[in-house]
Amino acid sequence: MSSVRLRVGKERAIAAGRRWAYRTELLPADAPPGAVVDLLDSQGAFVARGFFNPRSELAFRVVTEDPAEPVDADLVRRRIAAAWAYRKAVADDPRYCRAFFSEADGLPGLVADRLGEVVALQISALGLLPWHGLIVDTLAELLRPAAIDERGEGGARRREGLPEGSGVRWGVLPEPLVVEEGGLRLRVDVAAGQKTGHYLDQRSNRLRLRQLARGDGVLDAFCNTGGFGLQALAAGCARATFLDISPDGVAAALANAAANGFAASAEGTVANAFDQLRAYERDGRRFDVVILDPPAFARGRRTLDAAFRGYKEINLRAMRLLRPGGLLATSSCSQPVSDDMFLRMLADAAADARCRMRVIDRRGAGPDHPGLLGAEQTLYLKCVFLERL
Ligand code: SAH
């Protein structure tokens, strides 16, 4: 077994729960990229066993802290089975859930979303490649989907030095693929859609919106396939505007509205939300429900200040667009933005907007997206519901 060593004083974060070591925390090592190695402290004592990749910022990723546990096919199978047993016990609906979530389920870099009959798979750790076939077979055996589709693009793969390549790895993709959410039917395009095709992490928050939404006009900003705005329409709101910078997103949202009987109450706008929110304010347009679900503005700590300003800008505008009694459902999926930081941003935005806002509910992702203490980045999603007084 090859080993890599931590520099002096760098063992604490992993002992406290972090599931990786940064490249800068390791002494130079000659193990090959993708190898399973033992991580040793600066004295040479065992810390953890896991995947090594000197090309990646996350140069070591923990698989086990048990020195007697080999990283082998049996471990991979056990981890996937345990993750699935957990979902069957805790997921709101195991037919639509994240079936495997990377570090939180004990295999860094493996994500599997169950979207009804399809499993959308993402692999973003080089160390997992030798088990690719086994992962597919195990998911097929346990989850019994019609198809397993791999999404093999994106920054995380490039940073790991993983080759790009997407496609169906098992079975046959059903056409069309439809996800059910609180009685609504949403069409999902796993092959061309964003991420794994459907944002499962917001599922319980979309259903929460269904309980809280009231009034006439809804603005679903950063709508993608329109899941939030559709729940507001299902709750009885009269009209929804679906706003996204991507024409495909707006088209998908309008198609989903039509398929659920809301064609007459839905309109689409393709625009940059930063500009469009300002234009609505200038034109005196007001809403009873505003949803903000932007992409991550902060990827790392260095971009945090700019991200804070971006979040504040859109939230400030959204608050001003609300009628008194109106509801704001606002989210951030930026890993480095903590719950506290997000609330502080909202307080700043409310002060500058001269709006009195009441916090109704503070939420994260559902229990199918568990997070690890000591690695709070895994608790990345914040979703806050506020009422304008
Ligand atoms: N609310 C959606 C998920 C939103 S994902 C759901 O529940 O499914 C974020 C969306 O923001 C993407 O669809 C992306 O196209 C869009 N987006 C990114 N930058 C944008 C911008 N500046 N203005 C408007 N939309 C933007």
Image (spheres, rainbow, N blue to C red):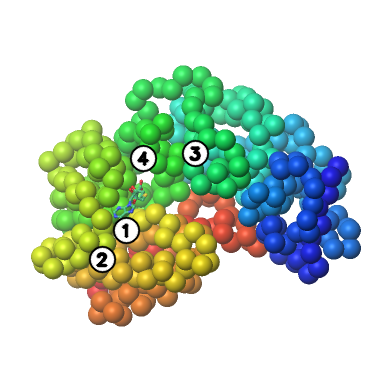
Q: Hey, what amino acid is under mark 4?
A: Glu
2 and 3 marks in contact (CB < 8 Å)? no
Give the mark nearer the N terminus: 3 vs 4: 3
Disc 3 element: loop
Q: Nearer the viewer, mark 3 or mark 1?
A: 3
Alpha-carbon distance for marks 3 and 4?
A: 27 Å
In this view, the residue in front, 320 or 151, is 151
| Rendered residue at 27%/50% (across/down) | 245
| Rendered residue at 39%/73% (across/down) | 345
Alpha-carbon distance for marks 2 and 3?
A: 33 Å
- Residue 212, relative to residue 139: is it above or below? below
Q: What label does residue 318 carry, if any?
A: 2
Q: Nearer the viewer, mark 4 or mark 2?
A: 2
1 and 2 marks in contact (CB < 8 Å)? yes
Alpha-carbon distance for marks 3 and 1?
A: 26 Å
In this view, the residue in front, 299 or 322, is 299
Picture coordinates of residue 30 (x, y %)? 80, 48
| Rendered residue at 16%/63% (across/down) | 279
In this view, the residue in front, 310 or 379, is 310
Q: Hey, what amino acid is under mark 1?
A: Leu
Alpha-carbon distance for marks 4 and 1?
A: 19 Å
Mark 1, residue position:
292
One can see residue 257 in this view: no
Mark 3, residue position:
153
Picture coordinates of residue 149 (x, y %)? 49, 29
Q: What label does residue 181 carry, if any?
A: 4
Disc 2 element: helix
Q: Hey, what amino acid is under mark 2?
A: Ala
Is residue 196 rendered to the left or right of residue 377? left
Give the mark nearer the N terminus: 2 vs 3: 3
- Residue 332, relative to residue 61: is it above or below? below
